[in-house]
Structures are given as structure tokens and as C-alpha cells.
Image (spheres, helix red, strand yellow):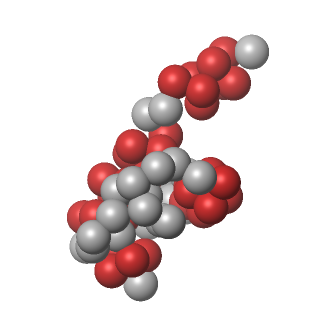
Amino acid sequence: MLDGALADTSYLLGDVFTVADLNVASVLAWVPLAGLDLAGAPRANDWLRRCTARPALARAQSA
């Protein structure tokens, strides 16, 4: 479902990162720890990679 929602947009609500992306990405960031694989959902996988590569996340994790 998420992969389909990202078919025509970079982020969940369009081409701009929003709180919706933050909320969903914060849950899906646990996917690797749960042993799940998003390889079957390439758009969702790329989206999650973009969300977790944001500079603000790196700053928050280093604080």
C-alpha cells in the first residue's frame, strides 16, 4: 500500500517532507530490527532511505 502511495510523489503528501512522513518513517525505521525486508517495495524502501538520511535526524541522534 505504501509503495503504491509513493508511485507519483517523493513523499507521502507530495514533493515536500511533512509530519506525515516523519510519523510513518519513525515506525518503519524499526523494519530492519524486526528482520523485515522492504526489497519488495522499492519505492517505500527509497522513501524510507530519504527520510532517514535527512540532516535533522543525524543532528537529533548526535545530541
Relative height, residue 57 to residue 49 (above, below): above
- Quarter of the view holding residue 43: bottom left
Question: Can residue 41 be seen from the camera position used here?
Answer: no
Residue placed most toward the observer, 14 or 12: 14
Q: Residue furthest right?
A: 63
Q: Tell me what residue is drawn at x 35 percent, y 69 percent.
A: 6
Residue at 33%, 80% in the rendered image:
4
Spot occupied by residue 3 in the image (x, y as percentages of width and height)? 34, 74
The image quadrant where one finds the N terminus is bottom left
Count of labels shown?
0
> In the orientation shown, which residue stands out farthest toward the bottom?
1
Quarter of image, res 2? bottom left
- Whole-percent x, y for residue 33 in the image: 54, 53
Query: Residue extending furthest top?
Result: 63
Residue visible at 27% across and 70% down in the picture = 8
Left or right, 28 with reference to 14: right
What residue is drawn where x is 25% and y is 64%?
42
Image coordinates for residue 58, horizontal then vertical, percent? 57, 23
User: Could one spot residue 14 in this view of the protein?
Assistant: yes
37 or 50: nearer the eye? Answer: 50
